Image: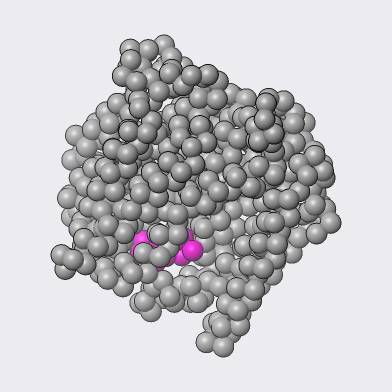
Amino acid sequence: MSRVDSDRGSRQDLFGRGMIYVVVWSMQLVVATAISPVLAHLLPVEEFGALAAAIALYQLLLLLAVFGLDQALEMRRLEDPDAARTRGLLAAGICFAFLIVAAFALSSPLWSSMLGFAGYRDLVLITFGWAAPGAAVMLMMALLQAEDRLAQFAFVSILSSAGGPVIGLAIMLSMGDRSAVTYAWGGVFAQSLALVLGLCWTRPRPAGLRDLPEFRRVLAFGAPLLLAGLSQFVLAAADRLAVLRVLGEAEVARYQIAFTIGNVMSLLLTFTNRAWLPRLKSLSDVAQRWQVIEQARDGIYVLLGWAILGVTLGAPVLLRVLAPPSYQPDSLVVVVFVVACCAIPVASGAASMQLLTTIGDTRPLGWSAVLAVAVKIVVTAALLVPLGILGAAIATLVALTAQVGLLRWIATRRQPATRPNRRVLGFGAAALVVAALSVLLPQSAGWNAGRFAISLALTIPFFMRMRILQRANPAAPDPGEKS
C-alpha cells in the first residue's frame, strides 16, 4: 500500500484533499449566492417566491429519485475490485431515477395545486426536466468521487450545479423575459450536458439491469438514507412550501434570502459529509475511524464558531446587498442567526451518520429522520403563524437538535465516545453568545460598516485554524485543546 493510500481517511487527508472535493461541491453554493441578489432585483417578488418553491420541489424530486443510491454506490465501489458490478448498479440506478421522476410528472395534476403551484404549471413541468438528468448526474458523481477522479468529478459537478444558474440567467437576459419559467430552462440544459459527459466517463453497464438481487440489496441500504435525506429536506427546504401556503410568495422570497445567507455552513457541512464518506470508509479499523471522525468534528466545531460569528456580524450588509429594501432586511438578521446556528447540530449529526453509514448500519438514520420530521411539523405548526418565518427557522433548529440526540445515543452504543473537548465547546459557546448579542445592535450605516469589517477580519483566524487542521499529525491529540 502506498503512503498516499495509507493516509487516505486520516484527519490530514480529510482537511487536505478531502476539502478539495468540498470546494467543488460548494461551487453550487457560490453561484447560488451570487445569482440570488440578481434574481431578487430582476424578478417580481411573486416570481422569485415561485422559483424558490420550484427549487424546493426539485430538491425533493432529487432525493426521491436518487433514493440514497449515491452513497450506496460509493460504499459498494470501495468493495468492488474491478468496478464492473458497481457500474451495473449505476445503470440500474439511472433507470430507476428516470422512472421515479416520470411517475411524479404523470401524477402532477393531482398534487401541484395543493402545493401552491396552481398558476405555475409550466414551471412544474420544467422542474421535472431538470430533476431527471440531475438525479442521474448525482449517481455518476458518486462513482467518480469513490474512484477519486477529481478532475472529471469537478467538471461534471460544476457544470451540473453552477452551469444551470449561469445559463438560466443568460437565457432570461437575452430573451428579455423576466420570468421564473425562462430562468428554469438553464437547469435543464446544464443537467443534460452534465449527463452526457457523465455517461462517457462512468460507462454504466446495462447488464446491471438484470442483477435484481444486488439492486434490491442497495435499495435496502439506501432506503434509510432516503429517509434521512427527506428529513433534511423537510428541515431545510420544505418549510418554504409551508410558508408559501400559509404566508404567501412575498414571505417565501424573504425567507429564501435569509436562509441563503444563514444556511451556508450547513450546506458546506453537507458537502463535507459527501466528500469524506468514501475516504473514511478506507480506514478498515472501525475504532480508528470513529476516533478520526470525532477529532474532525471537534475541528469543525472551532471553524463553526468563527463562521457563525462572522456570518451574523456580516448579515446586515449582506442582506442589503442580496435584497431590495422591500424585503425589510432589518427584521431578517435574527432569522439568519437562527438558521446559522443549525450548523452545530448538523456537524454533530454528521459525525454519527459517518460512523453508521461506513459500517453499513443505516437503519438508525431512518429512525432519527422520522423523529426530526415529527418535531419539525409540530413546532412549525405552533410557531409559523405567531412568529412568521422566524418560527420556521426555530422549528428547524429544534428538530435538528432532537435528531442529533438520538443519532448520538445510537452511535455511541456502536463505538464508545471520547470525552468532549471542553476548550472547543467553551469557545463555541462564547462565539454563539457574542453572535446572539450582536443581533441586538443598531442597524445604522455606521454600525453595519463596523460589524462587516469585523466579519471580514474573522476570516483570518478561520483560515489559520484550517491550516492547523491540515498540518496536524493524525495520531496526535486535537490541537483545539490548545486554542
Residue at image position (37%, 12%) is: 211
Task: Establish if 175 lies above or below 220.
Answer: below
x and y percentages locating residue 64 in the rendered image: 37, 34
x and y percentages locating residue 217 in the rendered image: 46, 17
Tell me the quarter of the image containing the N terminus.
top right
Residue at image position (49%, 63%) is: 261
Asked which quadrant contains residue 9, the reply is top right
Front position in the image: 436 or 383 = 436
Front position in the image: 51 or 176 = 176
Front position in the image: 333 or 394 = 333
Helix, strand or loop for the magenta stretch, by majority: helix
Query: Was residue 260 drawn as part of the magenta stretch in this picture?
Result: yes
x and y percentages locating residue 27 in the rendered image: 45, 54
Tell me the quarter of the image containing the C terminus.
bottom right
Task: Establish if 207 lies above or below 477.
Answer: above
Horizontally, residue 23 falls left or right of residue 300, namely left
Res 338 seen here: yes
Res 355 seen here: no
x and y percentages locating residue 296 in the rendered image: 69, 45
Task: Establish if 95 lies above or below 130.
Answer: above
Total numbered circles: 0
Task: Establish if 247 lies above or below 362.
Answer: below
Query: Was residue 86 drawn as part of the magenta stretch in this picture?
Result: no
Horizontally, residue 56 falls left or right of residue 103, namely right
Magenta span of residues: 251-261
Residue at image position (62%, 62%) is: 307
